[in-house]
Image (tube, grey):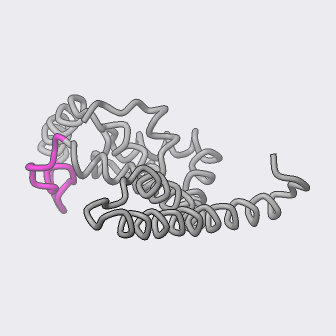
Amino acid sequence: MPSMTPEQARRSRRQALRSAVDTAAVCTGIDPGAFFREDGEQQIVWQARRADAVRVCAGCPVRAACEELALRDGDGRPDVDDMVRGGLTGPALAAARGRHSARLTAAVAADRDTEGRRLDELTAQLQRVAVKNPDKTGGHRGASRAQAAQNEEVRSLADQIRSIRTARRARAGWRTAA
C-alpha cells in the first residue's frame, strides 16, 4: 500500500483510515504495550521505550492515518506522557487536537454520517453491477433474462442513490438539484 499523506488522512472517513492502518501499519507484529507507559514505570525507562515507538512510527507508510484516528478518538492528554500513537506522544496529540478542533469536529460528524456511508456503499455497488457482463451461457433467452435482471438492479440502486441525494440536498436547503 502506498503511503498516506496527512492531507489524504484528513479527508478520509474513519473506515478508510482504519482499513489503511489494519493492512499496512508497520507496528502490526509489535506488542501494543510497547506504545503505552506501564503503571509505575520509571520516566527514564519510558523515555527510551517512547523513543523506540516514535522511531517505529516514523517509518510507517500509514502514520498519518494512525495519527488522524488518534486525534478523532481524543487520545492524549496535555499533562500526561503515557502513550505514542501515530508517531506523537500524548501531550503532542492533545496540542494537535487543540489546533485542529473545528476540523476534527467536522470529521467526527462525517464519520457518524451513516447516510453518507450508505450513499458511498450504494455508489460502489452500482458501479460493480453496471459493468458486470450478464451470463450468456443460458442461450438468447437466458441472456435476455440476465440482462433484464441486471437492468432492474441498476435502476433500483440508482433510485436509492437519487432518493438519498435528494433528501440530503433538501435538508441542506437546495431548492433545485445542481
Quarter-of-image position of residue 93: top left
Magenta stretch encompasses residue 44: no
Q: What's drawn in magenta, residue-wise?
A: 26-42
In front of the other: 34 or 140: 140
Q: Which residue is drawn at 36% across and 33% down?
A: 4
Q: In this view, does 142 lie to the left or right of 168?
A: left
Q: Residue at x 43, y 70 (%)?
A: 145
Q: Where is residue 133 in the image (x, y as percent from the top left)?
A: 36, 53
Q: Is residue 105 left or right of residue 47?
A: right
In front of the other: 145 or 51: 145
In front of the other: 124 or 143: 143
Q: Where is residue 173 in the image (x, y as percent from the top left)?
A: 87, 58
Q: Residue at x 28, y 67 (%)?
A: 138
In front of the other: 53 or 46: 53
Q: Position of residue 166 (x, y in %)?
A: 75, 62
Quadrant where the image shows the C terminus: top right
Q: Is residue 177 left or right of residue 95?
A: right
* Residue at the extreme front: 140
Quadrant where the image shows the N terminus: top left
Magenta stretch encompasses residue 32: yes
Q: Residue at x 31, y 61 (%)?
A: 135
Q: Position of residue 7 (x, y in %)?
A: 49, 32
Q: In this view, does 160 lie to the left or right of 24?
A: right
Callout count: 0
